[in-house]
Image (tube, rainbow, N blue to C red):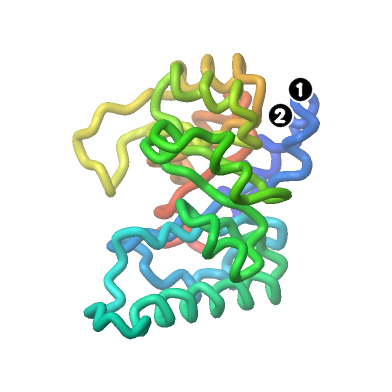
Amino acid sequence: MRTITNAARTLNLHAAHRLPAARRLPFLFLLTDAERLADPMSLLARLPRGAGVILRDYGRDYGRDHGDGRRERARTGSAWRLARACRQRGLILIVAGDARLARAIGAAGLHLPEWMARRDGLATRRARAPGMILTVACHSAPALRKAQRSGADAALLAPVLPTASHPGAPCLGTLRFAALARGARLPVYALGGIDEKGARRIRDSGAAGIAGIGFATTAAP
């Protein structure tokens, strides 16, 4: 974990020379996942202050919806507990795909999967989350260009390397990722397969930091 943290800090520092906005953003993002990391609470203590947590709540099962709001209360309660823990540890919480939930729990930002940004438009989502950090997942050069034009604060570009969550899926590779990151006019984070070895491979890529799941669940403290 220390290797990943140091690599992410260094990336962010170097990126900030070209893109000063990177200084105001987390250098490291932990993403939650309904299957691989449904409950990130136990891992928060491993994250350095100033790191970000992206709550990806879609797809999580909160039980049967009886029409009396119990499912929504369970969902909001879980998010509130995570928000409180992040504040206590100096972590920056961003909620994926749900501006209303982000506002309700006092999150610092909103993250959009690529399909949602494409469907709804970033301007519409920005209007629903004024003053928040807005990050977008991108999987191609056109998506990255659209994020730039639409005023996103940062992009999570993926997958850089093969990932456990999508085995066999095509990836950008470090050279293609670096070309896109260096040419972007907004901070770009490396997402997908970035373990300690992967972090060394992207150290000169122009990335503003590292995002992922596996680095927190498999790396030594």
Q: Position of residue 122 (x, y in %)?
A: 54, 35
Q: Residue farthest to the front?
A: 67
Viewer-nearest residue: 172 or 105: 105
Q: Is residue 75 above or below residue 156?
A: below
Image quadrant containing the N terminus? bottom right
Image quadrant containing the C terminus? bottom right
Q: As shown in the figure, which amino acid type bears the numbered disc 2?
A: Ala
1 with respect to 131 (left or right): left
Q: CA distance from mark 1 to mark 2?
A: 6 Å
Residue 15's tag is 2
Can see residue 42?
A: no
Q: Say which residue label 1 marks.
A: 18
Report crowding for label 2: few under 14, some 14 to 19, many 20 or more residues within 10 A (C-alpha).
many
Query: Which residue is depicted at the point 21% across and 41% down?
Result: 167
In contact (CB < 8 Å): disc 1 and disc 2: yes
Q: Position of residue 66 (x, y in %)?
A: 24, 83
Report crowding for label 1: few under 14, some 14 to 19, many 20 or more residues within 10 A (C-alpha).
some
Query: Which residue is depicted at the point 29% across and 60% down?
Result: 59
Quarter-of-image position of residue 195? top left
Q: Position of residue 211 (x, y in %)?
A: 51, 45
Query: Which residue is depicted at the point 71% across and 62% down?
Result: 49
